[in-house]
Amino acid sequence: MEENYQCAAFIITAVVIETESIKRLYPSWKRLSINGDSQAYYETWFEKDGERHRIITAQQSVMGMTAATVLTMKAIAQFKPRYVIMSGIAAGTGDEARQIYGDVIVPDVIWDYSTGKFVGPDETEIRFGDLGFLPRPRSVYIDEKMIELVKSTIGRDDNEFHVHIGPLACGSSVVANRAVVEKQVLSLFPKTVGLDMESYSVAFSCQNSAAPKPQAIVVKSICDFADSEKSDQYQKFAAYTSSGYTKYLLESILPL
């Protein structure tokens, strides 16, 4: 590991089901107490190529981009990780012919679809009854080298996960209405593969932190399709595949 980094990875989660899945990866997590910081951090180690590597994980206090920003920036300042990995669940944007529950999404670009201006319906093509929305999307791009490493895992015999690479839409609300996906997301970025509520902030924080800057990687698995049939039924399975692929990247793919 490069000298300025103090741990291999910081894994950030947003909800309990994601945290529990990460903690099941290794039996040796131990609580870390940081003076002056009430955040619950946990630490473990794994071996790779004869060397021990440190991982830290923590869960946001609440869901959403603000909490993701705060926790990511604190983790970078405190632990100086080489990678910040957001692991968890997300909504897919496709149909079951090309996406299924538990499929892994690794975005190459993350865009904030919730930024914009609410206007009259005659001022925009994005309309919800008498309400119009004029979008002003912002994007962050994941490092190309990281995406190439992810691409190299597709089709490998030792990779048991089905991985989609493409744009991930990030917004401040839970979506359970297909009209939002069609009108506000796919109309702007037709190749968007999923939606979540935190990833934009994690990637943005990594790219705008003080040195040494970590590489951001988002690993989200599909638990629903952001429509009226949205439920919690597949959340545990999606958290399992997301955390499993996160472990696979750390132990088999990412340079340490």
Image: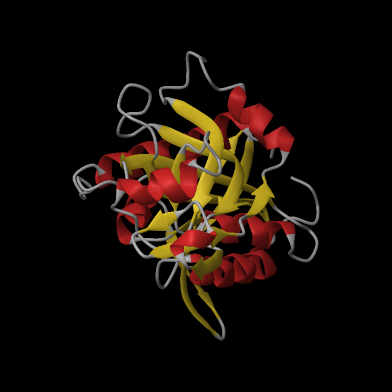
Give the side of residue 219 with respect to residue 200, left or right. Answer: left
Q: How many marks?
A: 0
Dividing the picture into quadrants, the one containing residue 7 is bottom right
State the scheme by which the image is colored.
Answer: secondary structure
Which residue is located at x 27 percent, y 39 percent? 237
Which residue is located at x 50 percent, y 51 percent? 125
The residue nearer to you, when weighing 120 against 237, is: 120
**Whether residue 36 is situated above or below residue 203 in the rendered picture:** below
Give the side of residue 106 with respect to residue 240, left or right. Answer: right
Which residue is located at x 73 percent, y 34 percent? 145
Q: Quadrant of the N terminus?
A: top right
Q: Would residue 49 be visible to someone looking at this image?
A: no
Q: Would residue 91 be visible to someone looking at this image?
A: yes
Q: Position of residue 187 (x, y in %)?
A: 50, 42
Q: Position of residue 208 (x, y in %)?
A: 74, 62
Which residue is located at x 41 percent, y 22 percent? 160
Dividing the picture into quadrants, the one containing residue 61 is bottom left
Give the side of residue 157 with respect to residue 200, left or right. Answer: left
Q: Residue furthest front?
A: 122
Q: Position of residue 25 (x, y in %)?
A: 39, 43
The residue nearer to you, when weighing 57 against 183, is: 183
Q: Position of residue 171 (x, y in %)?
A: 47, 59
Q: Quadrant of the C terminus?
A: top right
**Whether residue 82 is situated above or below residue 43 in the rendered picture:** above
